[in-house]
Amino acid sequence: MESYQRTIKQPITLEGVGLHTGVNTTMTFKPAPPNHGIRFRRVDLPGQPELPAIVDYVVEVARGTTIQLGEAKVYTVEHVLAALVGLQIDNILIELNNIEPPICDGSAKPFVDILLKAEIEQQNTLRDFLEIDQTIRYVDEKNGVDIVALPTDDYRLTVMIDYQNPALGSQHTGLFNMEKEFIDEFSSARTFCFLHEVEHLFELGLIRGGNLNNAIVIVDRDLPHEDIVRITKKLGIGEAVVIDKGGIVNNRQLHYKNEPARHKLLDLMGDLALIGAPLKAQILAARPGHASNVEFAKKVRKQFLQEKLVRKYQQDKKGGTVFDVLALQRILPHRFPFLLVDKIIEFKLDEKIVGLKNVSVNEWFFEGHFPGRPVMPGVLIIEAMAQAGGVLLLNGLENPDGKLAMFTSINNAKFRKPVVPGDTLIMEVTMQVRRARIAQMNAKAFVDGSLVAEADLSAAIVDRNEVAGGTNEKKSS
């Protein structure tokens, strides 16, 4: 069934105090065109810079997810993003006149309510789903975190939390139908913390806007009366405080028995929105937090960018082939007789690539190298590995059509065995260092599983118009 992108019909505004910074913020949601994605705009800064809601821009994960691009910084984006995911809104511009969205009641429900009031509008462009087709897993053994994405045809999340604390215990929850369950069962789950954490968070410069109206404070241990008075004063609690170990400050009623677990699921939804695409996956998460959510989102986003690249250049799906020779001609500038890769059979974005070259007796270089004893020149084996490395430089963030990789050095080159007609040359290239315009790679070539050549390659990535026509310099991607 086809699914179309969505936005809102009209602008709508919300005001309030930020949880961690305590600043007063006016936030306006505005409609956006197809393929715009979710963007924040800081209207209080010169030039009103925009900041895409993408995991690449996460800079802090202390009790909330903060993103930054240049001077534009936005704290605690996860609840706003969870509301957008839950309502399946793909394109929206969020204007802020300060650094942090309002915390409201500590849940996503106020954002859901105001977005529904603005009305959701279907657009005429299909949604570009990231469909998980193989297991993706993130494990943090030190903190007992395990997050897994499994293939499925919709979006489901299951969360288990266990703080090994008798005041909270072990809880779990699951969301299996976004349209039927999100608004009523999850959007109103509020953020929480333990009473003993309050002073430490305050000393870290956090929860400046926190109070009992926007967070659940769980009493997890007995405290002397003077400690209770000091802590609750920092929380801004003026009314009488009723505390019972294992209970809630002021005995506030929970919306759900497992409200903390449901809020952790809400946080996970918001953080995974930073992948930048709607998911079709079953997400299983044990003891998730913002730090682990973000690391997992980075892994999944890398797969999303890789799939977009493959779809862009490889028009026909072929078993055992990532890029065929026609796709390679769309990626690389090389042509006969100097295209020395026949296909790519493995590709891991920014990590590793495996290319294949069938060495035929009809190769042009065998006529002179050597008559009566054809051997593939070592320099061309290096060139073949370099061309495979040029494909590895694709990262999904820039259009490579206007780029060239000028190889700046070839080090530690070794030739182990001759390559002759009839051989199938397998080139494995792994990324060692990748910066904006510089890359260092290790390359190996094999025939029938035996190493025949290897080298360390360095390349500078330049615009094609920077390279003068007719240059004798080698262009290897």
Image: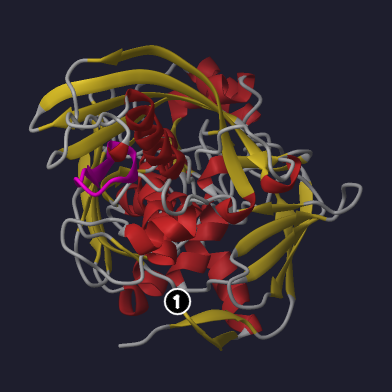
- Residue 355 lies within the magenta run: yes
Is residue 207 something one can see in this rendering?
A: yes
Taking the image as shown, residue 391 lies to the left or right of residue 46, namely: left
Taking the image as shown, residue 36 lies to the left or right of residue 395, namely: right
Q: Nearer the viewer, residue 290 or 452?
A: 452
Q: Residue furthest top?
A: 412
Taking the image as shown, residue 114 lies to the left or right of residue 221, namely: right
| Rendered position, 167 above or below 265 | above
- Which residue is found at the position 40% from the left and 84% from the top? 3
Question: Which residue is label 1 attached to?
Answer: 127
- Which residue is found at the position 33% from the left and 54% from the top? 262
Is residue 169 something one can see in this rendering?
A: no
At label 1, which amino acid type do we have?
Arg
- Which residue is found at the position 79% from the left and 48% from the top? 98
| Rendered position, 362 above or below 140 | below
Segment colored magenta: 354-366
Q: Residue furthest right?
A: 46
Q: Nearer the viewer, residue 278 or 341?
A: 341
Q: Position of residue 430 (x, y in %)?
A: 34, 29
